[in-house]
Image (cartoon, rainbow, N blue to C red):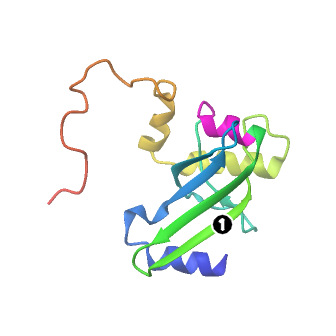
Amino acid sequence: RVRLQQSINQNSSLVYSKYAQLATVRPDGRPANRTIVFRGFLADSDHLTFVTDRRSRKVEEVALNPAAEVAWYFPTTREQYRLAGSLVVVGEQHPDPHLAQARQSAWAAMSDAGRTQFTWPDPLQPRTKDPLAFAGPAPGPQD
């Protein structure tokens, strides 16, 4: 954890330094990879935390096979980490009070924009029927 935390700190000027790639196993045995946002370490542990929508495919994949790997690249320090382990989905009725509290804390720490994503339609469904809704330039830093 110490070395990873050092890399995170040394790359903290890059907004995307909290983005990592998470690979899970699909029901047919093929890998499924996606970008996740690192939300911190579980208190008093080396466990990574991130937030996901319970409607996403990864929740189903983890229920069938919790094996996963994270690939994380830090451009400033030119380091890459590959971390393998087992995932645990902490839903609203999780029996472990420590994990249930961590879930509440992760939600509270999210930005309003982050929480708003959970009100969007189900994954793979369009957010709007208006094709021009996302036609403008992507939001980003303003000069």
User: Hey, which quadrant is residue 59 in on the image?
Assistant: top right
The image quadrant where one finds the C terminus is bottom left
Residue 111, placed above or below residue 48: above
Q: Residue lying furthest top in this view? A: 129
Residue 107, placed above or below residue 73: above
Q: What stretch is highlighted in magenta?
A: 54-62
Residue 132 in picture, x, y percent from top left: 20, 26
Is 86 positioned to the left or the right of 114 in the image? right
Q: Nearer the viewer, residue 126 or 26?
A: 26
| Residue picked out by circle 1 | 83
Residue name at image x 41 percent, y 62 percent: 16
Residue 113, placed above or below residue 38: above
Q: Residues within 10 Å of mark 1 (few under 14, many from 20)?
A: few
Residue 95 in picture, x, y percent from top left: 85, 41
User: Hey, which quadrant is residue 131 in on the image?
Assistant: top left
Residue 31, placed above or below residue 8: above
Q: Nearer the viewer, residue 1 or 109?
A: 1
